[in-house]
Amino acid sequence: MIDSLYVAWRYLSFNWGRSLTLIACVTLIALLPLSLEQLLDESERQLLARAESTPLVVGAKGSSLDLVMNSLYFGDTVPELLSMAAVDRVADTDLALPIPLYVRFKARGFPIVGTNLDYFDFRGLTIAEGRNLALLGECVLGAGVAEALQLGPGDTLLSSPETLFDLAGVYPLKMRVAGVLAPTHGADDVAVFVDLKTTWVIQGLVHGHQDLTAVTDPTLVMARSDGSVTATAKLAQYTEITPENLDSFHFHGSPADYPITAIIALPHDDKAAALLRGRYVGTDAADGLQQVVVPGSVIEGLLATIFRIKNVLDAVILVVGMATVLALILVFALSLRLRQGELQTIFKLGCGRATIARLLGAEILIILAASAVLTALLLVGVAQVDAALVRALFIR
Amino acid sequence: MRQHSQPFGLTAIALVLMLCWAQAAFAEDKLRIYTVNYPLAYFAERIAGDLAEVSFPAPVDLDPAFWTPDAETIAAYQGADLILLNGADYAKWTAKASLPRSRTVDTSRAFRHAYIRTSDAVSHSHGPGGEHSHGGVAFTTWMDLDQAAQQAEAIAQAVTRRQPDAEAQIEGNLQSLQRELRQLDARITAITRTDPSRPLLASHPVYQYLARRYGLNLRSVMWEPEEVPSESQWSELEGMLKTHPAKWMIWEGEPAEKTVERLRALGVETAVFRPCANRPSTGDFLAVMTENARSLQRVFGQESTGP
């Protein structure tokens, strides 16, 4: 048998082009369904684990999937906005702890998550370097962000403008990195966390500038009357929050009207969860403009859709695989015809039909073994990047 | 004899170690409460008693309303089991710091609709936001002792939620505190009821809730006790006295001697009514408020008879 394998190996090495093509074909047939299965398992793990650990999400009426994807996985699609009054409404029921989220802005491609410290307790996030958020304008980086951007405590990170064409819009905010989170192998690793109020600074709702009643530059003031000062466009707003200018930052309007994207509601028990959900049923509940969703149910619905698509993909792969196997058989049959003279010579040298069959079998065995090894290596490679791949393919 | 002393010594050391361990374990069980002013710290100490360790880290020489803690102190607040806020925009740093909502209690939330809005701020406009003002809310809510009692109740509810087994003890402590606050409230009401229209001056606009609760005819200037007012401030006062002929000015602290003399020349006497926002050098919140009630007795021309 060793002799047969040696002769087969020598033959395949000599005809390396044809051998590599066959190995690639077999590898692809095996790799496609296996890697797809692996990615779907990973997506199911990521999506369900996070969804099942989040009891309820309150948001504006609209797509529940967008709401959950944005609130749990910081997806790109921003749901309809809520006001902070909705947070007080949940708190006033005394049925659940509300954790507000404002996931709308980005910093160098990573989502900025505006929330409060209860979020860190809820997700069990711990600080690996530096310290937690303390003041306006600070941020805490997920482990993946810190690694990708090579940032650490004391560095700064600039928020990205929402649109390049918003020339008259709000200036980006230079945020100081207060700390870096320990890795969680989830969506929190690739997020930039700030206090909710800092997201309002990014939006321009909270801002700081020179004291208009004390400015001496006449070009900064358009009109001044008793109890009122109108500034010119020259009045610059601070783009970085420092201990020196922190006191000048102020809110415009009532904080109850400030926007958020969602509220994670943590009910005190099952009964409280049911009662809270009941408050959002019917048209008179929460002005009929809000909804409460159970993320686990929403994600299960999404996964059911994904698995329906997977069944179609499996059928396609099966047909393509069968066609490829037939093509391979044809390649072997044709190559046998081409090798007719070669096989006659082997026969005349004294090899029996069984020996010739063994030689051909050894060739097929080597090709299949090489394909198996290559498939395994590629699957290991997919496993290394599946978390990121799942985020890129299914979550963003 | 020497042979016996060694086991006794070891036993004593073991006992001391056990006591230390027990004390440390007990301390760990205690609630860690942080507050933003002294009245809340006093109420928390009275209500929680030995169930909690109450901290109010503002320096004694600063007004806690305008104090901004450093990052380390904010971290200490963040680590507390309970953070007691005064509400009414008091301690503006809390609006610019990250605090966990689940452990933060706004003690004046129950009467937030009764906050007094101040109208002395200049409005301004710039950019697309339109005109707005940085004027705020009067924040010395505890000067109305009925409101103080409500703040105490909010503290008791928050402590009970975290220590439900001690509900009876907390309720007892709350009732005792509220009884004393209401007695003092009744006393001040009785003092001020005699002549509610009597014009009074305040050296600083911090008595809004006191004036509302006890029906005082009070107008404020913006003077500091340790600073002698400027000539323009004196002119402003003289103008005010023409329409508001007050005979007494109440101060947050002892005014400078020169100020007292010049006020006396204008026919205005001085009395001290301490808001007690920071920890007093002697006594406690109720002692200071009792002293304040005595000051009001003088202002309203009554002899001090009570304690």
Image (cartoon, coloured by chain):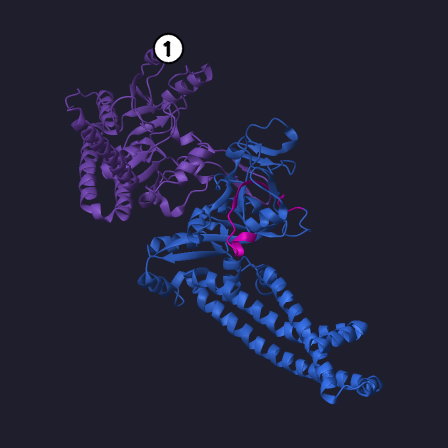
Residue at numbered disc 1: B258
Q: Position of residue A244 (x, y in %)?
A: 54, 30
Q: Chain of mark 1?
A: B
Indicate the quadrant where residue B119 lies.
top left
Name the residue rendered at 35%, 14% in the picture.
B263
Position above or below: A191 against B132: below
The chain drawn in blue is A
Q: In the figure, what tint was chain B given? A: purple
Q: Residue furthest front?
A: A350
The answer to whether any part of residue B247 appears in the image is no
Residue B204 drawn at (x, y percent): 38, 25
Instruction: Quarter of the image for the C terminus of chain B: give it.
Output: top left
Q: Position of residue B206 (x, y in %)?
A: 36, 29
Q: Quadrant of residue B14?
A: top left
Q: Is residue A187 magenta?
A: yes
Name above or below for residue A339 compared with residue B25: below
| SS assignment at label 1 | helix
Q: Which residues are magenta?
A: A168-190
How far across and how far down the image is residue B38, in percent?
A: 32, 31
Judging depth in this view, the residue of A376 and B158 nearest the camera is: A376
* The N terminus of chain B: image quadrant: top left
- Residues packed near mark 1 inside 10 Å, few (<14), some (14 to 19) or many (20 plus): few
| The one of B1 and B143 positioned closer to us in this rendering | B1
| Residue situated in front as seen by the camera: A119 or A168 | A119
Identified by mark 1, the residue type is Lys
| Residue B110 visible, this angle | yes
Q: Is residue A127 left or right of residue B86?
A: right
Q: In this view of the protein, which residue sits in the foreground, A230 or B278?
A: B278
Residue A110 lies, with reference to residue A284, above or below; the image says above
